[in-house]
Image (cartoon, rainbow, N blue to C red):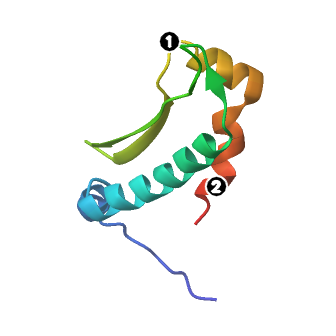
Amino acid sequence: MTEVKIKLNSGGIRALLSSLPVAAACAVVAHRVADRARSAGVMVEHEPGDIPIPVEVHVHIGARARAVVVLAHPSGAAVEVKHRLLGRSLDGGRV
């Protein structure tokens, strides 16, 4: 059997991981997760009354492109602990 050697192009991989198309793909998946989290209809206390929990998507391009889904409310961590809102919503991001 012959040996196969693969040499990775580190610079090319680094450029790919920090590219706009990869960031856009991450954003698409993050928005799907956020939409699924919003559709759960979890309400939080706010002035003047209860509101749907704000779910935000942040896309960053640095050494690697990434997207983050955030429960943007002071009680967001408590909501995640109680309802696993983001954890359950991950399935909505499947490609």
Mark 2 secondary-structure assignment: helix
Looking at the rendered image, the quarter that the C terminus falls into is: bottom right
Looking at the rendered image, the quarter that the N terminus falls into is: bottom right
* Residue behind mark 1: 48
Compare marks 2 and 1 and give the one earlier in the sequence.
1
Q: Residue 47: percent from the left, percent from the top?
A: 49, 10
Q: Residue 73: percent from the left, percent from the top?
A: 49, 19
Left or right: where does residue 17 sit relative to residue 77? left
Q: Nearer the viewer, mark 2 or mark 1?
A: 1
Q: Amino acid at mark 2?
A: Gly
Q: Amino acid at mark 1?
A: Pro
Q: Residue 86: percent from the left, percent from the top?
A: 63, 36
Left or right: where does residue 47 sit relative to residue 75? left
Marks 2 and 1 sit apart, C-alpha to C-alpha, by 31 Å
Q: Residue 80: percent from the left, percent from the top?
A: 67, 25
* Residue behind mark 2: 92
**Nearer the observer, 13 or 54:** 54
Against 95, is 48 above or below? above
**Nearer the observer, 28 or 15:** 28
Quarter holding residue 12: bottom left
- Residue visible at 75% across and 28% down in the picture: 83
- Residue visible at 46% across and 24% down in the picture: 72
Against 48, is 53 above or below? below
Q: Residues within 10 Å of mark 2 (few under 14, many from 20)?
A: some
Quarter holding residue 6: bottom left
Quick check: marks 2 and 1 in contact, CB under 8 Å? no
Left or right: where does residue 46 sit relative to residue 15? right
- Residue visible at 25% across and 59% down in the picture: 20
The outermost residue toward the bottom is 1
